Image: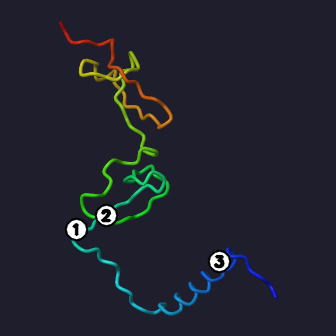
Amino acid sequence: MMMLTILQQLKYGSSIKNKVLNQRYQNKNIPEFQPPDGIVQISLCSDSLQPATEQCPNVIREYFIKGTEPKKNCNIHSDPTYKICVDSYQLATEYCPEDRVRERTYHFFEPPPNIPCPVHSPPE
């Protein structure tokens, strides 16, 4: 007699259960779940479990009691964009000429500049 490991038993048991349930409910009209008032569903990044951004490769949907859902977007896959002065390669200020300012996206592994442009200053 062949002995199955616990993992094999779980695998085969699960596959049999899925086949039975799929057959049982194959032609049934099962209504879509409607969350009660005060419950919200949001998309989360499966890596950070924070609200997903467009860059998140794996997204899951989860329910929360309204007001308890995470607010800060995914910090793993979001790439912040900064306005950079091309004369100093630092953060542009209101004194940098518009034609010298570019937007640049910094990936999570690159530190963005953290000081304001020292080249352009307020008019005296």
Decide which of tag 2 and tag 3 comes sooner along the chain.
3
Quarter of the picture containing the C terminus is: top left
Q: Which residue is mark 2?
A: 64
Disc number for residue 38: 1
116 left or right of 19 in image = left
Question: Relative to residue 46, is residue 113 depicted above or below?
Answer: above
Q: 10 Å neighbourhood of mark 3: few (<14), some, or many (≥20)?
A: few
State the image coordinates of residue 35 (x, y, percent, origin top left).
29, 74
Distance CA(mark 3)–CA(mark 1): 38 Å
Rendered residue at 49%/57% (across/down)? 58
Disc 2 from disc 3: Cα separation: 31 Å
Quarter of the image that includes the N terminus:
bottom right
Which three-letter amino acid code belongs to the residue tagged 2?
Phe
Residue positioned 29% across, 77% down in the render: 34
| Left or right: 82, with 26 as reference point | left
Q: Position of residue 114 (x, y in %)?
A: 37, 24
- What residue is pinned by disc 3? 11
Q: Earlier in the sequence, mark 3 or mark 1?
A: 3
* Image coords of residue 71 (percent x, y): 30, 51
Mark nearer the N terminus (2 vs 1): 1
The kind of residue on which mark 1 rests is Gly
Q: Position of residue 52 (x, y in %)?
A: 40, 53
Is 71 situated left or right of 50 in this image? Answer: left
Give whichever of 88, 112 is nearer the camera.
112
Q: Are marks 3 and 1 in contact (CB under 8 Å)?
A: no
